Amino acid sequence: MSNENNKTVLSIKDLKVDFETATGTVNAVRGVNIHVEAGETVAIVGESGSGKSQTMMAAMGLLASNGRTQGEVIYEDRNILGLPVGQLNKVRGEKITMIFQEPMTSLDPLYTIGRQLAEPMVVHGGLSWKAARAKALDLLRLVNIPEPERKIKAYPYEMSGGQRQRVMIAMALANDPDVLIADEPTTALDVTTQAQILDLLRDLQKRLGMAVIFITHDLGIVRRISDRVYVMKTGDVVESGDTQKIFTQPEHPYTKMLLDAEPTGHKPPVPESAPVLLEAQKVEVEFELDTGFLQPKHVLRAVDNISFSLRKGQTLGIVGESGSGKSTLGRAILNLLPAGGRVVFHGKQISGLDRNAMRALRKDMQLIFQDPFGSLSPRMTVGQIISEGLLVHEPSLSAQDRDARACQALEEVSLDPVMRNRYPHEFSGGQRQRIAIARTMVLKPEFVVLDEPTSALDRTIQKQVVELLRDLQKAHELTYLFISHDLAVVRALSDTVMVMQGGKVVEAGPADAIFEDPKQDYTKELVGAAMLTQQHMMETA
Amino acid sequence: MTITADNNAVPEKGRSLWDDARDRLLANRAAVVSMIVLAAIALLSILGPALSPHKFDTVYRDYVKVPASLEAYPRPEQVEPAFMSVAKRARMTVESYERDGDTVIATVTSKREIDPRATRYFDRSNLFKDTQLTDLASDGLSATVRAEINYLHFYFGTDANGRDMMTRTFIAGRVSLTIGLLATVVAISIGVIYGATSGYMGGRVDQMMMRVVDILYSLPFIFFVIMLVVFFGRNFILMFIAVGAVEWLDMARIVRGQTLTIKRQEYVQAAEAMGIDDGGILRRHIIPNTLGPVVVYMTLLVPKVILLESFLSFLGLGIQEPMTSWGVLISEGARNLQGAAWMLIFPSIFLTSTLFALNFIGDGLRDALDPKDR
């Protein structure tokens, strides 16, 4: 671990952050020492709740009103912690800048990109509007926005997530900062976009020589971009040092666990004799977009002519970036939205059935969602949520029987049935996803569509959920349609994989063939960007 | 950053979002004070008329528009003139007048024979009670009158008809609060069911249902009330039917908007994927999740309804004499503002503190139910 020296630009000494809440004081950060040198990239990794974001928010004086801080944050031989806002603003936003995770909400939708970039330069920098505009254009060029002359007049909604994140970076660079703090800047982006943004950041750092503090939960990114790493757990730095050393010789058990959290293993193949459970032929979904009065209707083909068949016990993985139509396909298969083509389940055609006719089949065909925070009704207890499906599909059960079944389902997903009277908000993300799984398992389905079930979870939790899904599949001979953008998880769970782009299948085949020997350029790009190679490096190391 | 729940203690019963909201509400000092004030006003309105020594419709002709006072009436200087005037009405001449504590003793003479029933003249006055005629002379032309002074308290004064304002304010509170609550309940039940159905069904059904709301919106409220009054005559029930029938329109729109967002939540989609029927989704998923804004709107609707009722009563379309409501009392008070300010002040204090309390509770509830908004 390098020690502080004359190149150190920002150092955080023994920083403590406490939050006063209704239920008592929460120690979010418990005495953290972090420093960064000019031209260096430092990564802070940890899972959600480890205090990694709060550390930097506290250093910047951006804590929620119930937060208390202690310690020192030294920038240019001065403690900036607890400075009055007026003095703090001379440093923050100018010499130390931040980029946040959510590029969709960080820009004001009412103003053009150019105006939002130029305004701080006019207001704080004292430039004229014309000069500020010219500088904004330079900045857009610097962050490689295509057609900067046109985009400077664009509104945020006209840009993609990646482009918006580039604009945010441009904003952060406006005043030649000494330190750039990036708080999960690529988490909300697709893998290929993510790779581009990371390349951009690395390139900018080389050119401008600033220090970068990179907050992330993704070890792949850490390995790719950072020089030094701090590993945080529940408000403490448990390990720190050079990236290479942390990855090759981790010392703390938590670091080892994080490194080991990549889902591994392969799915055993299903015997050829297994009966075909579900068959989809030429499935199509079209959305009519409202273009305006008297203008021709614009039709978006979200799913275009997709066919596959699944045998009992098989898992089909569908990968693709956002907007590729993979979730729409999953819902079309379940007949949750109007679709063309034919879907045959158990030898019975289900496409075109109305809601009442589908109701009997819903018991056997289930759906699990990505967001474990949104998919559980916040005003119902866990027991009510799990047993709700039984009200419809097994109406003869008494309240006691339903409760017993809910307990059974909770045990099956390794949760304590004692917790069934609690409400969803009292559980962590991983536990909620288990509850969502229990809700489908209570009906004993045969076919489950899993729509990004692990994407919102931390890596270590992800691994547990993958194990759980695998065990359930084995125990109940379930057939999965597994939708994800996370190639590592798909690889660990699927027999066959379908790569989708723009509603079409780009490539399909056995999982190993797709990942080890991709034929199409898009698949290669996707696999490359997902940094699966890193897994191999680790296995050989 | 999320704060994970402490897993060491596993309570049998979970804390619902409502429990959390209640705790946050109880931590809000303004809301708690408001709730106490509101509870006190409600209790006074319910129990006050029964505890008060006066009835709300008793007329004290001798105490028309007397100011509010903690001291009892009659005042010492009022007794003698009042006694004289009663005696005059009874065609008696007062020879001697003497006051002994709470008793007035006077010898009276008359040109005609004094009828023993003449004591009623005195008793009928609000100032005296238990009048007795003693020492009636044999010719019946002179006697001694002993009358007890009847002490009465008018803490809020009396109105232009000599009725006790305090009792009337309490009874008016009963009427206003009842109308406020009942009309709100009517408005909210119609509005929530209508709005949730409309929003959840969507498409053409939604269009139809919301256009009906638009049509009802365009009816002038006063015209609507006058029509109802013409058809059904004036009565109490009509009041909150009229108000409820108009106010549910806002509620329906609010709930529909809420439903449109909730409908796209994943837990509703999950329920659909599970094959739950529309009724079940509405009942278990949509309506419970719209209730936050509904509760807040309710606390704002109650004062609105009370004011509407006041307005109707002010126009003479509302509550009828001798029944009264805060609106009626205030409109009377406003007419008598010169010289009898207490007639306006006391009902106004009650009405405004109720409105303030409800608004603070509404604010508190909004903060409690939606902590993210703060």
Image (tube, coloured by chain):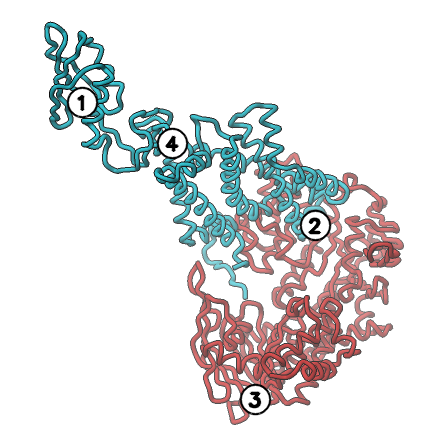
Chain colours: A red, B cyan
| Relative image position of residue A334 (x, y in whole percent) | 78, 50
Q: In the figure, is residue A408 to the left or right of A20?
A: right
Disc 2: which residue: B269
What is the chain identity of the residue bearing mark 3?
A
The local crowd at label 2, few if under 14, some if 14 to 19, many if 20 or more residues have their Cα within 10 Å, is some
Residue drawn at the location 52% of the way across and 94% of the way down: A6
On the same chain: label 1 and label 2? yes
Residue B169 shown left or right of residue B257 in the figure: left
- Name the one closer to the observer, B44 or B176: B176
Label 2 to label 4: alpha-carbon separation: 55 Å
Q: Secondary structure at mark 2?
A: helix
Q: CA distance from mark 1 to mark 2?
A: 80 Å
- Say what secondary structure mark 3 lies in: strand
Q: Report the chain holding disc 4.
A: B
- Which image quadrant: the C terminus of chain A? bottom right
Q: Earlier in the sequence, mark 1 or mark 2?
A: 1
Q: Residue at x 58, y 27 (%)?
A: B229
Spatial CA span between label 3 and label 2: 49 Å
**Residue labelled with disc 1:** B148
Q: Quick one: label 4 or label 1, which is nearer the N terminus?
A: 1
Residue B168, which numbered label?
Answer: 4
Disc 3: which residue: A37
